[in-house]
Amino acid sequence: MTTPDIRVEKGHAEPEEVAAITAVLLARAAAQPADPADSAPPKPKAGWRRLEREGGFRAPHSWH
C-alpha cells in the first residue's frame, strides 16, 4: 500500500495531527461505494408548486 502525500499549506502541523487527518481521509474514502450505480439515484425535484406554500403577494408585473 502506498502512503498518500499530504502537505500542510499554511501553519505547522505536528506528525500526530497529520496522521490523524490521514486516517480520517482514508476512512472516508473506504466508506464510499465503489460503484456509483450501487447508490440510490437522487430523487427528482417536483416541477410544480403547491399554492398553499406560496406567499400571498405577487407583483403586478409577474405572471405564473
Image (tube, rainbow, N blue to C red):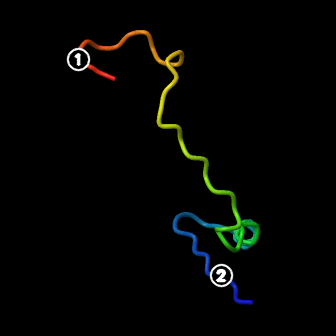
Task: Pick whichever, 10 or 41, lies toward us.
Answer: 41
Q: Nearer the viewer, mark 2 or mark 1?
A: 1
User: Considering the numbered disc 2 on the image, is that residue within a helix, a strand or a loop?
Assistant: loop
Pick out the residue farthest to the top.
56
Q: Residues within 10 Å of mark 1 (few under 14, many from 20)?
A: few
Quarter where residue 2 is shown: bottom right
Q: Position of residue 7 (x, y in %)?
A: 58, 75
**Which residue is depicted at the point 53% across and 15% down?**
52
Question: In the visual, does 55 lie left or right of 28?
Answer: left
Question: In the visual, does 24 lie left or right of 58?
Answer: right
Q: Position of residue 60 (x, y in %)?
A: 25, 12
* Residue 17 disc label: none
**Which residue is depicted at the point 43% across and 9% down?**
56
Q: Image height check: is 63 above or below 2?
A: above
Spatial CA span between label 2 and label 1 = 58 Å
Q: Position of residue 10 (x, y in %)?
A: 52, 64
**Which residue is depicted at the point 53% across and 19% down?**
53
Pick out the residue farthest to the bottom.
1
Tell which circle, 2 or 1, labels the residue nearer the N-terminal end: 2
User: Considering the numbered disc 1 on the image, is that residue within a helix, a strand or a loop?
Assistant: loop
* Residue 61 disc label: 1
Residue pointed to by mark 2: 4
Q: Position of residue 20 (x, y in %)?
A: 75, 67
Task: Pick whichever, 29 or 34, lies toward us.
Answer: 34
Number of marks present in the image shown? 2
The type of residue carrying mark 1 is His
